Amino acid sequence: MGREGVLNWVVALALLAVPLAAHALDEPFIVTLATKVAILALAGVGLNIALGLGGMVSLGHAAFFGIGGYAMAVLAAPVQAYEPLMTWPVELPGTKSMPVIWLAATLAGGLAALAIGALSLRTSGVYFIMITLAFGQMLYYFAISWPAYGGEDGISIYVRNGFPGLNTLDPIQFCALAYGVLMAALLFSRMLARSCFGLALSGARQNPARSAALGIRPYSVKLTAFVISGAITGLAGALFADLNRFVSPAMLSWQTSGEIMVFVILGGVARLFGPVAGAALFILLEHLLGGVSDYWKLFLGLALLGIVLFARGGLIGTLAGREVAHD
Amino acid sequence: MTEPVLDVRNLQLSFGALKATDGVSLTLRPGEIHALIGPNGAGKSTLIGLIAGTLTPDAGQVFLSGRDVTGTDVVARARAGLARSFQVSAVAGELTVLQNVVLAVQGARGQSFRFFRPALGQADLCEAAEAHIARVGLSDRRAVQAGDLAHGERRRLELAMALALCPRAFVLDEPMAGMGPDGAREMTALLDDLRHEAPILLVEHDMDAVFALADRVSVLVSGRVIASGTVAEIRADAEVQRAYLGEEMLE
C-alpha cells in the first residue's frame, strides 16, 4: 500500500472515529457536522468522477444535488400532508422510506445528467463550464417559480425519512447510514477507475483523438461517466435534504455547484479520497473560522488560491505525493 | 491482381480557395509498404485525415477491404481495421505503457463499457497487450508512464497501440519524425516487420527509410499525386526531382 492508501485509511477512520467519540461525549452537534461532511463528500465523489476521471469541469452539479433533494421532497411531502403522490393514471402513495427515495434520487440525478450531458458534451473547455452553469441556473429558477414545493421558501419535511432497522432521528445512526453510503460510493468509484471503462475514460480525457482512433467514442464514454456522476450527486442531494429535513432552491444554486467543486479541488482532483478530505476541511474551516470572523470565506478563498497555484494535487496530493499508476 | 486493402478514389477537399486535396487516388495492396512523400504543405496530413475519417471529403470515396467507408467517422473506421499513428505522438501520458496498450486492445475488442473487473486484472487483455509491447521492444518499460518515455520509445508505443487493433491497414504519419539515426534504423526494421501484419501507408520525410522500405512511392505536390511508381521509377522521374527530391538525391 502506498502513501495515498495509508492516507485514505486515516481519513476514512477519522471520519468514523470523530462522530463515535462525539457520541460518547454526548456532543450531537459534532455528530451532525460529521454527517454533513459525509454527505457533502458523497456529492464530491459524484463530481470527481466527471471532473477528476473524465476531465469534465461541470459547474452545474448543483442541479443533480438539488434534483436529488427535491426527489426526496416530492416523495415525502404527500405523506405528511396525507395525500397521494398522484392519482392519475394510477393512484400512487408517497413514501418515507429512504431506500425508495435514494433509488428515485439516483435515477432522477442520472436522467438529468443524461439530458444535460448529452447537450453539454457537444462543447468543451470553457463553453462546457458555461453551458453546465446555464442548465443549473435554469433549474434553480424553475424551482423558485414552482409553487407546489414552496417556491423560493423551500419545503420542510418535519420527520426524517426512515430506514429499515434504524432510528434515523438518532444522530449517530443517521451518521452511520451516511457514512455507509459514502464508503459504498468510494468503493464503486475505485472499481470504476480501475475498470476497462475507467481506462477508456482516462484515455478520452487525455487524448480524445487517440481514443477515437482506437475505436472508442470519447463522447459516449464521457456521457456515461457524466450520468454516473450526476446519479451519485443526486443521491447525496436526497441525503442532504434528509439531514436538514428541508429542501430549498439554494441546493440548486450555482454557489452549491461551486462548493462541491471546492471540496474536490481542496482535497485533490482525481484522488479517490479527495472529496472526503476536501469536504472535511471545508466544514472544519467553516466551523472554526466562521466562529472567528464573518469573513471566513475570504480566508477560504486565499487557501484555494494557494492550492491552485502551489499544490495542484490538493490536500491528498500534497501529503501523498505524485500519483502512482495502479499496477 | 489482388484486391487492394485500402482504395482511395478521386478524393477532393478544399479549404476556401485552397485545394488541399485535389483528385487523389491511391491504393494499398496486401503486404506492401506504400510511401507517400511530398514537400511541406503538399497536403499529406489532410489526405491522412480524409483516409482516417477526421476530415470529410467534398468528393471522392475511401474503400477499406472493398467496403465504402467514406460516410463513416474515425471510430467506425478504426473498428473496421484502420490503424493510424499521429505525426505528433498521441498517447495518454498519465497512463503507463501497459495501460495504453490495454486501452488499444479493449478498444479493438469493444470492451470499453465494462465497469466491474480491473482492466489490469484481466489476463486475456494484459497478455495480448504484453505481446504487442514485446513486438516493439518495450517490455522492460511497460510500467513507465507514457509521458516519461523518450521520444523514440513513445513512437514505438504508438506502433504497439496500432498493432493492438489487429488492423487490416496501417496509416502511419511520419513515424521517424524527430528520431536520431539509430532510432530511425530501429524503426525501419520494425516497420519492415509490421508489413507482415498488414500493409502500411507510410507518410515519411526520411528518404533513407522510404527508399529502404517502400514497394511503391507516390509523390504528393499541391494536393495532387504527380507521380507514383517503384522506388527506381520515382528516383528517375524528372518532375519529382524538380518538385521535391533536390540535387543531393540524384547521385
Image (spheres, helix red, strand yellow):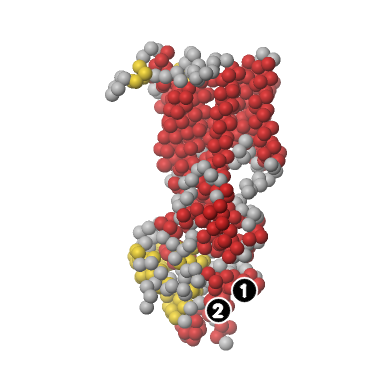
Residue at the limit of the structure toward the left, as seen here: A89
Callout 1: 10 Å neighbours few (<14), some, many (20+)?
some
Q: Chain of mark 2?
A: B
- Residue at 62%, 47% (x, y): give it: A326
- Residue at 44%, 81% (x, y): give it: B229
The picture quadrant where one finds residue B133 is bottom right
x and y, in percent, of residue A221 in the image: 47, 46
Front residue of this view, candidates A184 and A309: A184
User: How many discs appear?
Assistant: 2
- Residue at 48%, 78% (x, y): give it: B215
The picture quadrant where one finds residue B188 is bottom right
- SS for callout 2: helix
x and y, in percent, of residue B61 in the image: 35, 66
Under mark 1, the amino acid is Arg
* Residue labelled with disc 2: B212
Q: Chain of mark 1?
A: B
Alpha carbons under labels 2 and 1: distance apart: 10 Å
Q: Is residue A152 above or below residue A108?
A: above
* Residue labelled with disc 1: B185
